[in-house]
Image (cartoon, helix red, strand yellow):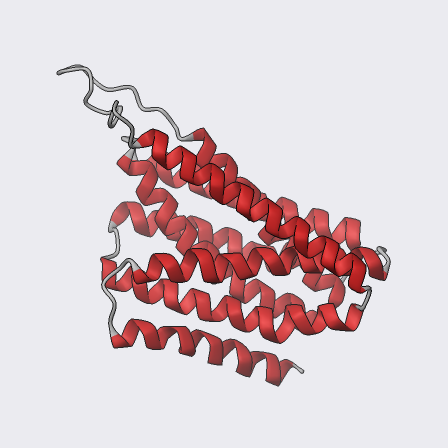
Amino acid sequence: MSAVGQAAVLVAFPVAASAIGSVIAVLRRPGPRLVGAIQHFAAGVVVAALAGEVLPGLREEGNLGWAATGFVAGVAVVLALAAYGRRRDAAASGPAGSTAGAGGGGAATVVLPLGLLVAVGIDLLIDGMLVGLGVTLGSTQGLILTIALTIEILFLGLSLAAELTDTGLSKTRAALVCTGLGLATAVGAIGGAALLGGAGKPVLAAVLAFGAAALLYLAVEELLVEAHEQAETTLSAAMFFAGFLIIYILGSLGG
C-alpha cells in the first residue's frame, strides 16, 4: 500500500475519535474527575510518542540547522495560537458578558466562535500532518503517532462540543461541527503523506521538529495545565504514567 493509502487508513481513527468524543459530550458530559484522568492519560501518551518516536526519528534525520528552524517555527505557531486564544477568552468574558440571554425574552442569536474553530482546525491540520509524516518514516512511527493523536483528538472532541453547546448551539449542530473539523486531520495526513513522500532529509527534519514543538506544547502547556485545574486525585495522576507506559510498550514491541 502506498504512503497516501496508509495515511488514509490510519487517519480514519482520529477522525472517528473526534466524532465519538463530540457525541459523548453532547449526550452526557463527563465529570471533572473523569476529564482530569483523560487529560493526564492523553498527556502521558503524547509525551511517550514524543520521547520514543518523534525525537529519536528527528535525531536520525540529522540536519541540525533545519531541525532547529522547524522547531522554532513550530513554537512560534503554537504560541501565536495560544496568545490568540487568550485574547479571544478575554473578549468573551468582557463587560458585555454572554451573548445568550442579553435581549430579554426573545430567542438569542447563536454566534459561532469562529476564532476558536479556526484555531482548532489549524491544530488538527498539524496533527494530521504528523500522521502523514509518521507513515513516511515507517509503519511503527505512523502507528504510535496515530494512537497518541487519536486519544488527544478524542479529548478535543469532548471539550469542543461542550464549549459549543455552552454558546447555545444545539447538541446536533455541535456534534456535526466537531465531526466536520475532525476531517481537517484527514486533510493534513493525506496531504502530508503525498507532499513528504519524496522529500529530502532536510525537509523531513524541519517538519518533524515542527511537529515535535506542537506535541510538546500540547502535552505540557495544554493537557497537563488543564488537567491540574480539575479535581486532582492520585488515580488521575497515575493515568499519566499509564498512558506513557502503554505507548512505550507498544513502541518496544513494534521495534
Residue 87, compared with residue 210, is above or below; it is above
Nearer-the-camera pick, 236 or 197: 236
Whether residue 51 is visible to the viewer of this picture, yes or no, is yes
Q: Residue at x 79, y 68 (%)?
A: 61
Q: Position of residue 87 (x, y in %)?
A: 42, 34
Q: Which residue is located at x 77 percent, y 73 percent? A: 60
In the picture shown, does residue 46 fall above or below 182?
A: below
Locate residue 67 relative to residue 181 in the image: left or right. Answer: right
x, y percent for residue 80: 55, 41
Where is 88 relative to 148, above or below? above
The location of residue 47, given as percent across then percent down, is 52, 69
Residue at left 24%, top 27%? 97
Does residue 80 appear left or right of residue 7 in this picture?
A: left
Residue 75 percent coordinates (x, y)? 60, 52
Foreground residue among 33 and 132: 33
Which residue occupies the extreme left position in the image?
Answer: 105
Q: Locate residue 93: give its quadrant.
A: top left
Image quadrant in which the C terminus is located: bottom right
Viewer-side residue, 92 vs 177: 92
Relative placement, left or right, of 244 versus 167 is right
Q: Is residue 160 left or right of residue 211?
A: left
Q: Quadrant of the N terminus?
A: bottom right
